[in-house]
Image: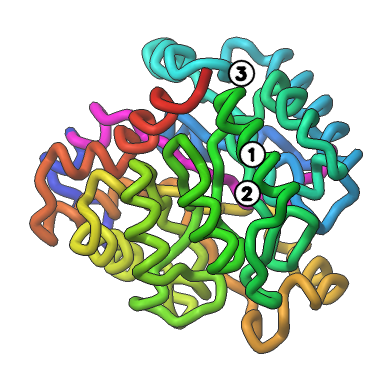
């Protein structure tokens, strides 16, 4: 869709909304070119959750990444705001800065100790999922045996609820997610997951998972990877197919955006080849395309054309995740 095809209504909605991207997809490492975060700023995004670790790497690397990322961001206060509260996000938006918090993809980052939850929270981690594709000591991953939540996993949830960190079920096994959503006393999210009913992939989530998330008061962020959207297609129409499906199933107030966008895709082939257990060949047969943040106005136009109301669109763009963060973060 050419830029000129984005209607005035869609442009106005996008320019006035809080735009929240709940997960970045670049490889969590202390040496990426973080100047690429300007891709989000220039695209009109106001808040981004940056991944600082996942189960593929050693738990100590997550702390090194946090140290490097925090220092880099603090050295650029005219461009970025390190977030502690939701008020920081709204303040950053008014000042033209990109608000940043962090997330962890897998509880191996805790090194088996629930006390680490509070440490990460104090360093800016605001959401953490259970297991990155493969099982760990806390629960099951989506590409492994469908094991449930462990006693250690329950202890971690209790601590996450206590400190105000969002319980995230993306990448995790069906049984683990269902048990976690039942156990948590706070709203639960799937930070970056698509609907399996729209496209059958082991990383996508089922209707009962989507419904259970909504029952907690949570939000599902639609993932922008082509292999999860369908036939490696990152068209706005394909993305909105997942948005519309979930909105019809549980209401638009439980849908958000989490593009999982990576600016370092030239390194992904080597990463996949070296970690085939995490990314099984039968599920990852081709290099995925990534939907970029600059496509978001076109996605808004597509939602307008599909008949979404203005309040629903602004909620999906960011208001829904903001609501959940206000309810959970402390």
Up the image or down, 67 lies above or below 141; here it is above
Seen at 70% across and 56% down, the residue is 150
Seen at 12% across and 40% down, the residue is 310
Magenta span: 13-30
In this view, the mark in front (1 or 2)? 2
Considering the numbered disc 3 on the image, is that residue within a helix, a strand or a loop? strand
Q: Nearer the viewer, residue 150 or 222?
A: 150
**Disc 1 target residue:** 103
How far across and down, in percent of the image, does residue 159 sit?
65, 31
Disc with the residue nearer the chain's start (3 vs 2):
3
What is the number of callouts on the image?
Answer: 3
Seen at 55% across and 77% down, the residue is 202
Marks 1/2 in contact by CB < 8 Å: the verdict is yes
Seen at 37% across and 12% down, the residue is 94
**Disc 2 target residue:** 129
Marks 3/2 in contact by CB < 8 Å: the verdict is no
**Disc 3 target residue:** 82
Q: Nearer the viewer, residue 327 or 147?
A: 147
């Amino acid at each position: 869709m050419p830029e000129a095809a984005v209607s005035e209504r869609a442009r106005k909605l996008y320019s006035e909304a809080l735009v929240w991207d709940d997960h970045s997809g670049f490889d969590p490492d202390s040496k990426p070119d973080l100047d690429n975060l300007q891709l989000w700023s220039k695209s009109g995004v106001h808040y981004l959750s940056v991944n600082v670790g996942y189960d593929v790497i050693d738990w100590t690397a997550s702390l090194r990444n946090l140290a490097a990322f925090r220092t880099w961001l603090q050295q650029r206060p005219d461009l970025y705001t390190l977030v502690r509260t939701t008020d920081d996000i709204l303040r950053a938006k008014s000042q033209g800065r990109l608000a940043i918090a962090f997330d962890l993809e897998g509880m191996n980052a805790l090194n088996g100790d629930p006390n680490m939850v509070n440490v990460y929270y104090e360093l800016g981690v605001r959401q953490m999922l259970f297991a990155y594709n493969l099982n760990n000591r806390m629960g099951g991953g989506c590409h492994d045996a469908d094991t449930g939540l462990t006693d250690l996993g329950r202890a971690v949830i209790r601590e996450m609820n206590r400190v105000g960190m969002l319980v995230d079920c993306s990448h995790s096994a069906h049984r683990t997610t269902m048990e976690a959503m039942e156990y948590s006393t706070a709203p639960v999210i799937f930070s970056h997951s698509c609907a399996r009913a729209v496209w059958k992939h082991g990383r996508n989530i089922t209707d009962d998972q989507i419904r259970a998330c909504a029952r907690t008061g949570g939000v599902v962020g639609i993932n922008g990877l082509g292999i999860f959207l369908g036939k490696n297609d990152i068209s706005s129409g394909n993305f909105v197919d997942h948005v519309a499906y979930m909105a019809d199933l549980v209401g638009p107030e439980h849908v958000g955006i989490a593009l999982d966008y990576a600016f370092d895709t030239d390194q992904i082939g080597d990463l996949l080849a070296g970690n085939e257990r995490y990314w099984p060949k039968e599920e990852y047969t081709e290099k995925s395309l990534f939907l970029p943040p600059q496509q978001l106005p076109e996605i808004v136009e597509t939602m307008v054309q599909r008949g979404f109301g203005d309040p629903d669109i602004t909620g999906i763009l960011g208001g829904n995740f903001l609501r959940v963060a206000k309810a959970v973060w402390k």
